[in-house]
Image (cartoon, helix red, strand yellow):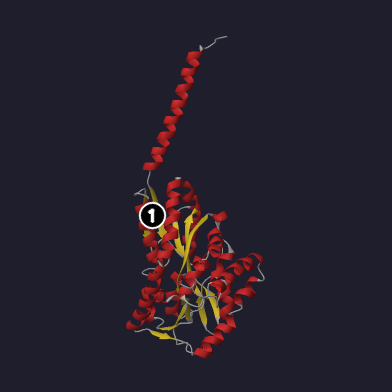
Amino acid sequence: MRFEKPGMIAAAAGTAVLALMLGAARAQDSNQTKTYVMKVTTPTINDAPHLLAKNFAAAVERDSGGRIKSEVYPASQLGAIPRQIEGVQFGAIQAAVIPPEFFVGVDERFEVMAAPGMVDSLEHGQRIAADPAVLKLMLSLGADKGLHGAGMFIAQPDSIASRSPIRHLTDFDGKKIRIFASDFQSAAFKRLGVTPVAMTLADVLPALQQGAIDGAVAGITVFNAFHYQDAAKYVTETNQPSIFLMLEISKTWYESLPADLRQVIDKDAATETVAINPSAIDLFNKARQSWVDKGGELISLPADEQAKMVQMIASVGEDVSKTKPGVQEAYAIVADAAKRTRQAPSQ
């Protein structure tokens, strides 16, 4: 049997420790120099979601010292909305700015932000989106299905672009109108006598042009940016519900990042989804004016009919959610925040 001298054992141990230290140092250096690509997708263009995507991408690239290279793909360049969401879940796309209703296939609680009658104004919606209880809920959804919620904001209220004018509540009756993929929207429009048709954004304009649908729910910035005027020049500003946007990060990609870059993602997402608020209001107002300048018409229901419409659909959130325990609990959180934030904090 061979016995090593104590000095030789100590030297060998020291060499092993040194090798481990050098390996760890090289790994750390590698993490500090490795670059990552972040593709950011959004279905629309030249509006608040697109601007948020650009601002977030620029902030991350700057604050990461160039270690994250950002690419922004608006107007569904990376596929229809369901494909964009799948891409984020599986890591082919690193970030997405998409309304929460489109994530109901991931978790049906996402649709609670689409409850009608909840938001009184853009400023009220901004306060709801910033509420800690609401953010805690919404950013946690989808965590077990490949999503890392990073931020949320409100872009604008909903409007309806239609082939023939909708000037009164009775004009809704019998119309086929495109909606987001939300039971809340479906139930609300059925109460107005509408046949709701869930449809991804890329299919909406062709469907209007071909007469397959009579109208479509979306924001005025969308109608304006995609030049809906020729197919559906009439926009009825129902202002119900409102369009919120989620900033979702691929969890697979996020967890592959070094800790310092994960902090950059979270910090910049939180910052930019608040900083977008004044610009979102400005973009909304400019789109309304541009729509008229390009030959479109903006319509408001008579005040008494607008009030009646809101009354007809106000209970949709409670009625739909009570059949789904998980959604009911989530709706209660958001509805409570809407009540608490209805009045702006006193200065």
Taking depth in this image into account, of 266 and 205 the one nearest to the observer is 266
Quadrant holding the N terminus: top right
Q: Is residue 178 left or right of residue 57?
A: right
On screen, residue 18 above or below 188: above
Residue 246 makes an appearance in the image: no
Q: Is residue 181 left or right of residue 297?
A: right
Q: Residues within 10 Å of mark 1 (few under 14, many from 20)?
A: many
The extreme left residue here reads 293
On screen, residue 210 above or below 105: below
Picture residue at 58% right of the left edge, 62% below the top = 107
| Quadrant of the image occupied by residue 188 | bottom right
Picture residue at 34% right of the left edge, 53% below the top = 62
The extreme top residue here reads 1
| Quadrant of the image occupied by residue 208 | bottom left
Picture residue at 45% right of the left edge, 59% below the top = 270
Taking depth in this image into account, of 290 and 59 the one nearest to the observer is 59
Residue 298 makes an appearance in the image: yes
The extreme front residue here reads 347
Q: Is residue 28 left or right of residue 142?
A: left
Total numbered circles: 1
Q: Residue under label 1, please give it.
A: 60
Taking depth in this image into account, of 278 and 314 the one nearest to the observer is 278
Q: Where is residue 256 in the image (x, y as percent from the top left)?
A: 47, 46
Q: Where is residue 174 in the image (x, y as percent from the top left)?
A: 55, 85
Amino acid type for the residue under numbered disc 1: Val
Quadrant holding the C terminus: bottom left
Q: Where is residue 129 in the image (x, y as percent from the top left)?
A: 50, 67
On screen, residue 189 above or below 201: below
Q: Is mark 1 on a helix, strand or loop?
A: helix
